[in-house]
Image (cartoon, grey):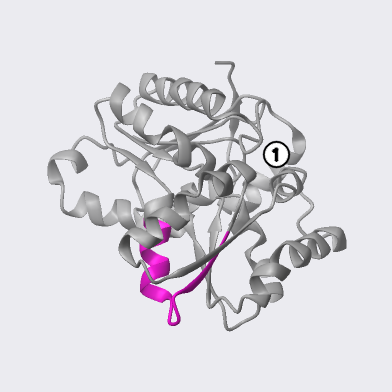
Amino acid sequence: MIGIFDSGIGGLTVVRAIMDELPGYDIIYFGDTARTPYGTKSGKTVIEYSLQNTEFLIKQGAKMIIMACNTASSVATESLKKRFNLPIYEVITPAVNRSLKETKKSIIGVIGTRATISSGIYEKKIKEQNPDARVYSAACPLLVPLVEEGWLKKPETRMIVKKYLHPLKTRQIDTLILGCTHYPILKSIIQHKIGKRVRVISSSTAVAKQIRDFLSSSPEIDRKLSKNGQSEFFVSDLTPQFEKTAKSVIRQHIQLKHVSL
């Protein structure tokens, strides 16, 4: 099984992307909805949660882990790789690589949670590959709660997105990284507000393509993954709104199971 975890509903965009890139592969998902959002937590707390989430997925049969959370990816990746002896993927590097391929002027914008933006991880990784790139970042702390509440078509959401993106728009970025897996759920609004000429990069799609390429070149790992077309979805808190939004993201009926870590 491919194990995927996130602080809440956003990681389901990674699940959907994996389903598109690797149809038939078994997937197990854990959304830590009882403790969301991670973006307002300390690094120590996020690492602790990430270790617990990974242990749960491994106990359920996961043979590889995708950290479908930018906040966890920015602070907990090394801790997980030291603790667990199996392939562990984060969502930041694939998005960075994709943005550098897509940008024409090397003027890249990044939006994410406070924790992700404060870590400076995107700028660091971009400049490691292109020291001349200009990177402008904006923390968007209200977007995750808006997605979790299902406020996907509210005028307030459009207004807040416009306000967050305004500083990046004035910088004339040509590429925008959605540095949170919740944000692809708002991609149509984000694209409209940032402008049609800006290339919007989803970390969910980017990591799914990287996993596909990795497995095609690593048959010894691919053989360990079951391929029965089955998916299991676990959450630490179950609400009617989460169920509704989850089904719209996955685009099929799913059964959410409540579990306490």
Q: Which residue is the extreme one toward the front?
A: 132
Q: Nearer the viewer, residue 138 or 185?
A: 138
Q: Nearer the viewer, residue 20 or 208?
A: 208
Q: Where on the picture, by quarter, is residue 187?
A: bottom right
Q: Which residue is the extreme one toward the right?
A: 155
Q: Is residue 81 above or below residue 228?
A: above
Residue named by callout 1? 242
Q: Nearer the viewer, residue 219 or 43?
A: 43
**Which residues are drawn in magenta?**
94-110
Asked if residue 38 shows in the view, the reply is: yes
User: Is residue 217 shown in magenta?
Assistant: no
Q: Nearer the viewer, residue 203 or 130?
A: 130
Residue 139, percent from left and from top: 65, 52
Identity, as a three-letter code, of the amino acid under mark 1: Phe
Judge left or right: residue 121 versus residue 7: left
Rendered residue at 15%/53% (across/down): 217
Residue 248, percent from left and from top: 65, 52
Residue 133, percent from left and from top: 42, 70
Residue 89, percent from left and from top: 35, 42
User: Is residue 99 shown in magenta?
Assistant: yes
Question: Which quadrant, please, contains the C terminus?
Answer: top right
Asked if residue 18 shows in the view, the reply is: no
Question: Which quadrant, please, contains the N terminus?
Answer: top left
Q: Residues within 10 Å of mark 1 (few under 14, many from 20)?
A: many
Judge left or right: residue 73 versus residue 191: left
Q: Which residue is the extreme one toward the left?
A: 220
Rendered residue at 69%/66% (across/down): 165
Rendered residue at 63%/30% (across/down): 41
